[in-house]
Amino acid sequence: MPHITVLLAEDHLIVREGLRALLKIETDLRVIGEAANGREAVALAAKLNPDVIVMDIAMPLLNGLEATRQILHAAPKTKILILSAHGDDAYVDNVMALGAAGYLVKQTAGEVLPTAIREVHHGKHFYSPSISKRRFQHQRQARAMGNLPKKDAPKLTSREMEVLQLIAEGKANKESADVLHISVKTIEKHRQKVMEKLNIHDTASLTRYAISTGIIESCVQITILE
């Protein structure tokens, strides 16, 4: 029986080592690559074509949300299983809307990760038990209330999401331009467009927005909020 191939995308080395050790004992699962940030995840996904990607959300340079969007755009059959310290509805809804196949919170991932990988590989969705229970309750409440539609969040392009993350990480325009291999003038245009779409017009507020939506972790950028 062929292995289910897995790519680990997680910026903390100790967590990646723990995940690798956990999956190593599973005879039908094989870790074929590891990425320390979202950009590496996108590149390795294209190179290795894994069956399942275990993806953290808050990673440097390119977060798991945007990495998920880029990977699934290029390879829609890839299954992405989100692994995050945050289980808030906003985090879950954001990545599931992008096409992720499952969502695990790190506190319980060790108990169910192998099962979750197998389930999403076979075309099913999988959530941590706490998330699954909460989503069921929300769906039941929505049906009881007539399933009122939610107001859509502002839609940022892939490039605008990248620029927003770099702004929130404290990168100057020149640094962002170097990372994305575009001109400073183009960065400035994207920055202005992001502010217009979000109706946010200062860097500190952009950073708070990035934290609240899971684009970066609160520990990544502290000085600008003090």
Image: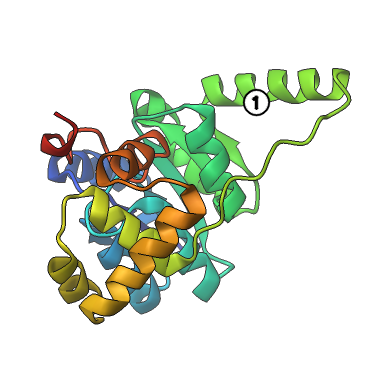
158 left or right of 163 in image: right
| Residue 57 place in picture, x, y as percent | 36, 45
Q: How many marks?
A: 1
| Residue at 35% across, 46% down | 215
| Residue at 20% across, 56% down | 36
**Would residue 4 be seen by someone viewing this image from the given angle?**
no
| Residue at 23% across, 59% down | 61
Give the answer, above or below, for where 53 lies relative to 213: below
**Would residue 171 be seen by someone viewing this image from the given angle?**
yes
155 left or right of 65 in image: right
| Residue 49 place in picture, x, y as percent | 42, 72
69 left or right of 223 in image: right
What scheme was used to colour the molecule?
rainbow
Q: Residue tagged by mark 1?
A: 135
Looking at the rendered structure, the secondary structure element under dot 1 is: helix
| Residue 6 place in picture, x, y as percent | 38, 57
Amino acid type at circle 1 is Arg
- Front residue of 129 and 222: 222
| Residue at 32% across, 36% down | 208
Asked where in the image residue 182 lies, by quadrant, the reply is: bottom left
> What is the residue that sits farthest to the front in this orientation?
201
5 left or right of 118 in image: left
| Residue 129 place in picture, x, y as percent | 54, 22
CA neighbours of label 1 inside 10 A, class few (<14), some (14 to 19), many (20+): some
- Front residue of 166 and 87: 166
Which quadrant is home to the C terminus?
Answer: top left
